[in-house]
Image: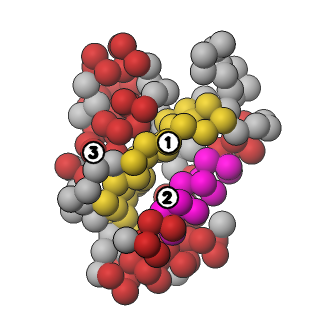
Amino acid sequence: MSTLAAEIGTLLVARGEFVATAESCTGGLIAKLMTDVAGSSGWFERGVITYSNLAKQELLDVPEDVIATEGAVSDGTAMCMVEGLLMSSPADWGIAVTGVAGPTGGTKTKPVGTVWISWLHRGSDPLVRCYHFSGDREQVREQTAHTALTELLKFLRND
């Protein structure tokens, strides 16, 4: 994943753009992978860990009713997270993740491994996708980070 992060950094520097992350189930793993790259201060703007519902509301302005009606693990929450991230930062790109990493916390409708990832390029509409990863807690978190970075790289290449 370090190669993915380095490639993202190269493209962002060439574009003069920055990325920010809002993470729940990954607990800052995506930001860590990006900031492991030397020179990341030239393209990584900030990372916010919003693990609790209250943090999502206070730091990313996720409406309480979205969490109450759709749940913290939902397309609506992921979309609000990434929109709130870009509203509160000067970054050009945002990534937000929310999910159930396990081993507990899953339900029949949102089993362990259910993760919503959202990406947003300033001035565009957010893209939100649901994934169902398998494995233990660490594997779900790693798959989430890998997918978030892989898709961002695709967007940067095709934007």
Callout in the foreground (1, 2): 1
Q: Which mark is residue 31?
A: 2
Q: Which mark is residue 129?
A: 1
> Foreground residue, 150 or 25?
150
Image check: 103 left or right of 47? right
Residue 89 in view, yes or no: yes
- Residue 130 location, x and y as percent? 54, 37
38 relative to 149, above or below: below
Q: Name the residue under label 3.
A: 83
**Residue at figure coordinates x 31%, y 60% from the top left:** 121
* Element under disc 1: strand
Q: What stretch is highlighted in magenta?
A: 142-153
Image check: 59 left or right of 96? left
Callout in the foreground (1, 3): 1
Q: How crowded is mark 3: few (under 14 residues within 10 Å), some or many (20 or more)?
A: many
**Which part of the image, by quadrant, shows the C terminus?**
bottom left
